Amino acid sequence: MPRADRTPPRAPRPAPASGTRAPPGASARRLRLRDRFAAGARHHRETAARSLVRLAAAPVQSLMTLLVIAIALALPTALYLVVASLQQLAGGLDAGNRLTLYLHQDAAPKAIDGLLAQLREHAGVSAVQFISAEQGLAEFKASSGFGDALDLLDRNPLPPVAVVTARDQPSAAALTALADEFAKLPPVDEVQIDTQWVARVNAIAAIGRQAALALAAVLALGVLLIVGNTIRLAIENCREEILVVKLVGGTDAFARRPFLYMGFWYGLGGGILSWVMVAAGRWWLHYPVDRLAALYQSQWSLARLGVVELLVLAIAAGALGAMGARLAAGRQMSAIEP
Amino acid sequence: MIRFDQVCKRYPGGHDALSEVSFALRAGELAFLTGHSGAGKSSLLRLIMLLERPTQGQILINGRGLGRLHRSQIPHYRRNIGVVFQNHHLLLDRSIHDNVALPLRVSGYRASDVARRVRAALDKVGLLAREHSKPLELSSGEQQRVGIARAVVHTPRILLADEPTGNLDPELSMEIMKLFSDFSDIGVTVLIATHDIGLIEAMGRRQLQLRNGRLVAGSDADAAG
């Protein structure tokens, strides 16, 4: 700077800019590879920062676009959360290895003792819990509120029950075989397997998962188009800049780069915002859901959106945004020629 | 350095902007391109910049035919040319420094080189003090000088100027011409399209005169080029 300052504006024979005599233009080609790389990295940083500043310069418009992207991404994310919760529900309860044995009401206590002993020794059984008819009635009275009405009954209508927990987690077929085996034992009236509803929940979760995937695909396309359209307008507004860049020897890639970053920022911002939206929705819902679960004596709760989900959302959305921008910029950039 | 060989440019619709134009400029030569508006001055400059391709004939720059240049090579080719535009073509949302730095940025210069060269170029046009201003804070003449700084900041081999003194008073015009002349002294080939007869006469340099797309004067002065 001080050197430049001392040079009079109209020196008799000033060298142009570089101060080297010859050959003009050669210095550009003499740039070393490492310098080029460093300059490239710096250019990327500057371009990324400038794109961000440009988005901030039109906050309302940028926010609108971000919101649209966030909503589009929040829908499949929310569905994913519901599916994950359902799977937790189906997997969290080990109802899948439990059999309920309803015994004959008139079964002799001795026969019942024999049965329980036999069950406990069975290789496929890990635990047996016996609920006598009296216990059952007492529990029912306590929990149902029909206490007085039940007193009117002249005899206990409930059968004694043995709840058998199978060892490990048998397959549905193995559990059914076990149930068939126990059903043949004399004091046993009926065996109920608790797997059916688990299978149903799993089936529903599978549908939900497929639906979430399809929805994600459709809405990803939507995000691609939203970003593409926004970038198309941005490029149109920067026509002059692109022209000048091309006039001074900038490549298409150079002229395109700020817009790719703009698309990336839109995607990234939309992804993070959608995470916030879904996390807020989960927070809003989780109290009533927990209350409902508590009524069923369950520890089950809504699945959480964690840091991993945030990263996946942000990166995937950022990539989507950059892709949308690339698609939009591709044609348009070559159309803008000086 | 610049050689036109029977170059014709016909625009769609049949208008002949240039017909059978042949001339050659040596490296370090300074020449004026004159003629009425519509005579083909801008078309000729656009052909050198490869903004357009000739319909017929050949253009050789530094011995290399432009016809062979692939579209993807054009940006790299343009980095050897500095252009001063009549309407400045400055980016209004960027500082003077950033505007002048643009040709260096697209070529991937180091940050320290960029700063040094930009300041040197701005110093040369007497605008170093306005480095951080925005173009609209400058007068039209100052904007023109920023355009000149941007055209020379990367020390191009060829300097093209389209009416570079259109918005300047005579004294400033003379200064700018002196600057162009200095560049030609160190080997830059300079071609200036202008109406300014007084200036051309004062400079006493070669004149390529176009009339209705034909070169009517100055063509054979240096045909061997």
Image: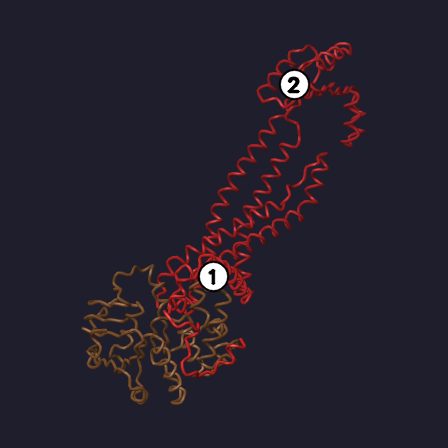
Chain colours: A red, B brown
Element carrying mark 1: helix
Residue at mark 2 shares a chain with residue at mark 1: yes
Q: Which residue is mark 2?
A: A191
Position of A164 compared to B179: left or right?
Answer: right
Q: Residue B213, position in %: x, y?
A: 21, 77
- Seen in the picture, residue B48 relative to A115 is either above or below; the reply is below
Depth check: give the residue in front, A118 or A266.
A266
Q: Is residue A36 in view?
A: yes
Element carrying mark 2: strand
Subunit bearing disc 2? A
Residue type, mark 2 in image: Val
Residues at badges 2 and 1 in contact (C-beta under 8 Å)?
Answer: no
Q: Residue A91, position in %: x, y?
A: 63, 32
Q: Which residue is mark 1?
A: A258
Examine the image and state in which quarter residue A102 appears. top right
Residue A124 — which label? none
Q: Residue at x 48, y 45 (%)?
A: A217
